[in-house]
Image (tube, helix red, strand yellow):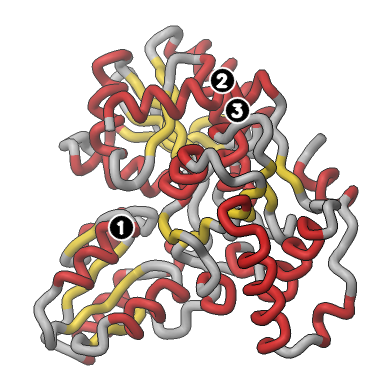
Amino acid sequence: MSVIEFIQSQTGMPEDYKNLSASEMEKRVKAIKAEFGSKLFMPGHHYQKEEVIQFADVTGDSLELAKISAQNNEAEYIVFCGVHFMAETADILTGPSQKVILPDMRAGCSMADMADIYQLERAWYELQKVYSDTIIPLTYVNSTAEIKAFVGRHGGATVTSSNAKKMLQWAFEKKQRILFLPDQHLGRNTAADLGIPLKNMVVWDPIQNKFEGHYHDETSMILWKGHCSVHEKFTVENIHQCRKDDPEIKVIVHPECSYEVVQEADDAGSTRHIIETITNAESGSHWAIGTEMNLVQRLIKQNPDKVIRSLNPYMCPCLTMNRIDLPHLLWSLEKVAEGEPVNVITVDPETARDSQTAIERMWQLS
């Protein structure tokens, strides 16, 4: 069953929840959490709304949260405040008796949706005709379980923005070329950081099922034509404007931003790197941050001794990441309390096994 078919099969949240006051919903969420205790675990991604993240038992990035969930043997229900691919990963790594729940099935990731298994199988066939058995696939954890499983079956591994450099080095020890998906920018920025020339990187267009531009024998990075709809909106012009407005400002961005933006910035790194850099920065320092707006606003609130702004002041929060709100959270928890949980995420055993292989290859090196 596809994600769309699954969404269509789910019962929607009753309209009554939208009429409740925030204080009433917060009171009911707290009561359910208190009732279930350690049997209920709520991980929350850094990009979640404040109205949701306030109830998280732990905050972090997607794979970190899935790993923590897997280590929690007491929890019977894991209510994952993130997006669909994160909940899939949690289901892959947790035990068979544990149920992973996504409060709103519309919470997805546009980047993950830019690579589906049919496109990948079709692309792999064409790439094998061109480069034979010289390619190893790597996938960003921001991908579907089916993509992770394909990578696992073909000798590859998952990567995070924190360990992408190490994983590319590992992959190049295995094969001459890497197929990196679904985010072309993380692949390009990481490869460039390893000293690979841009001329040795080529983009694969999954819609047209062909290379975009020139490819040759020296090609070492095949980049899937995918991107994060939030991070791709940050521009070099944004950086120039920030520096014009504030000559003291330092610019830090996520490597899902374009190559040009990463090159122009003062620093680039994973969500964890951004948080740690801002937290440990000198009091009174000035920062422009190129990442999701909810996290930027949280960092502003947590660091009142620093001058912090978004690199793009007109940037909207990630629309799909922000699907989970307080009404959906309460609804999903009350359905758990009634013994009728909704939006339970289940990955089939074969896909889960091969996905876990790709994840564990990464963990062995991390």
Which is more N-terminal, label 3 or label 2?
3
Image location of residue 35, percent across then percent down: 67, 64
Residue in the picture at 9% in, 78% down:
282
The residue indicated by pointer 2 is 354
Residue in the picture at 32% in, 14% down:
175
Q: Nearer the viewer, residue 51 or 266?
A: 51
Is residue 311 something that shows in the picture?
A: no
The residue indicated by pointer 1 is 272
For residue 148, side relative to residue 333 (left or right): left
Image location of residue 292, percent across then percent down: 44, 69
SS state under label 1: helix
The residue indicated by pointer 3 is 120
Label 2 packing within 10 angstroms: few (<14), some (14-19), many (20+): many
Image location of residue 254, percent across then percent down: 33, 59
Give the amino acid type for the residue marked by disc 2 in the picture. Answer: Asp
Give the amino acid type for the residue marked by disc 3 in the picture. Answer: Leu
SS state under label 3: helix
